[in-house]
Amino acid sequence: MRYVVESQLWRWEVRTDSWTFATVPAEESAEIRELVGDLARGFGSVPVTVRLGATTWRTSIFPSKESGTYALPIKKAVQKAEGVAVGDTVTLDLELRI
């Protein structure tokens, strides 16, 4: 399954030095949770292939108990390559690898 979403980049409050994330919107997160069911991995993670601009990489999205959405980590190398930073709104192409 594939999703194209827009999300604002944010920094994880616990580790502000290194972790930047994008939130998968609520509607898409609910659909992913339903599709994945028992196939989720450790911590409820879901493996994905992501494209941001010209950069593609493999990672996982992680469920947030507080918001009911998934959080997608954005590597520093991707941020640098695509010229994006915390606070920017980006378009992400997510493909589930389940």
Image: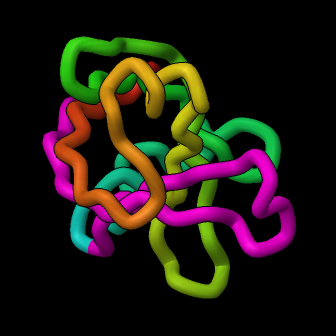
User: Looking at this view, is 19 or 40 the one in front?
Assistant: 19
Relative image position of residue 77 (x, y in whole percent): 55, 21
Magenta stretch holds residue 70: no
When asked about the image quadrant of residue 12, the answer is bottom right
- Is 5 in the magenta? yes
Is residue 98 visible in the rendered image? The answer is no
Closest to the observer: 6 or 31?
A: 6
- In this picture, residue 1 sits left or right of residue 75: left
Rendered residue at 20%/24% (across/down): 53
Q: Is residue 68 visible?
A: yes
Q: Nearer the viewer, residue 43 or 79?
A: 79
Task: Report whether 64 appears left or right of 35.
Answer: right
Query: Can you say whether 61 is above or below 58 in the image?
Result: below
Question: Residue 10 vs residue 31: left or right?
Answer: right
Q: What is the x, y in percent for residue 75?
A: 58, 30
Q: Which residue corresponds to the image point at 18% horizontal and 51% vertical from the top-left?
A: 5
Residue extending furthest right?
14
Q: Residue at x 29, y 33 (%)?
A: 94
Image label count: 0
- Dividing the image into 4 quarters, which one contains the N terminus? top left
Residue at 59%, 31% in the rendered image:
76
Up-down: is 84 above or below 57?
Answer: below
Res 47 quadrant in image: top right
- Indicate the colouring scheme: rainbow
Instruction: Find residue 40 and report its horizontal and vertical position in percent.
Output: 63, 41
Write down the region rendered in magenta: 1-26
Residue 69 position within the rendered picture, expressed as x and y whole percent measured from the top left = 46, 70
Q: Going by the picture, which residue comes out furthest to the bottom? A: 66
